[in-house]
Amino acid sequence: MRRAGFLLLGAVIVLVLLGPELAPHSVTAPVGPPYAPPGPGRLLGTDHLGRDVLSRLLAGGRPLLLTSLLAAVAGTGLGALTGLLSALLRWVNATLFRLLDVLAAVPPVLLLLLVLTALPSRAGLVLAVVLVSAPLSARVARATADQVRHRGHVEAAVLRGEGIGWLLTREVLPLVAGTLLADLGLRFVLSVYLVAAAGFLGISGTGSDWGLLVVEALPGVALQPWALLAPALAIALLAVSATLVADGVGARAKAVLA
């Protein structure tokens, strides 16, 4: 199952990254009547403006994937660093970690709307997802680090007078890296949903992504269901494949910590 998850995620990522080059038509020019069903030259039919759904689907995945990946890496990195430091340093736990706790109390969609209202751009979208992801990753990192900070080799390093950099990189991180990677996979799935939701709400800051395709297809779903089903299934496939990989990495990480 783990290998299948990696293969599926790899295939989806390659297809998404190459998607704009594989699009058979322009994403802006009409190729037929509005809400035309699938047929020759338009495999998934047309949207409300007569544009090719397949071409828009292939072109819209790359910005969603790259934005989600960037936001997930930044959010997990920030959260993991704060969580690991809070497990070793009391002042971090009393200050930075509590700030993240306050941030975690804000509903994700509300935080997304607030940030994108102030900064309606792709950078604002990344910032919003980072602010949503970091508190969750910090919790996971601190809980994992708590399991290893009292082990003999860590205590010995503390008695030798090793600095915080040594403790983190040489004593703690090698044991918790698997869990952090699994958490990165889950934060990526969360990022995909939030970025798609921003597109669905029309506040993503870009003119085309899978969330926008979904909302644009809703009025004509009875006439052309593939315009809705195709981007919805693409989002689900990306999220499910990433979840399978995260589950596999997480199972291996538990064996390391045991």
Image: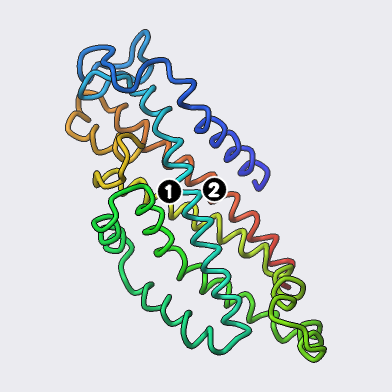
Q: Is residue 34 above or below residue 130?
A: above
**In the rendered image of this protein, does residue 210 appear above or below residue 58?**
below
Label number found at residue 192: 1
Q: Dot 2 surroundings within 10 Å: few (below 14), some, or many (20 or more)?
A: many
Q: Residue at x 72, y 87 (%)?
A: 150
Quarter-wise, where is residue 34 in the image? top left
180 on left or right of 151: left
On residue 242, which mark appears? 2
* Residue at 31%, 45% in the rendered image: 204
Secondary element type, mark 2: helix
Q: Residue at x 65, y 56 (%)?
A: 249
- Screen quadrant of the C terminus: bottom right
Report the side of 133 relative to 172 (left or right).
left
Total numbered badges shown on the rendered structure: 2
Q: Residue at 54%, 35% (x, y): give it.
A: 12
Tell me which amino acid carries mark 1: Val
Residue 225 higher or lower than 215, as above or below: above
The answer to which quarter of the image holds residue 179 is bottom right
Q: Earlier in the sequence, mark 2 or mark 1?
A: 1
Q: Position of residue 92 (x, y in %)?
A: 53, 83
Q: Residue furthest left?
A: 219
* Picture quadrant where residue 77 is located: bottom right
- Which amino acid type is shown beneath numbered disc 2? Ala
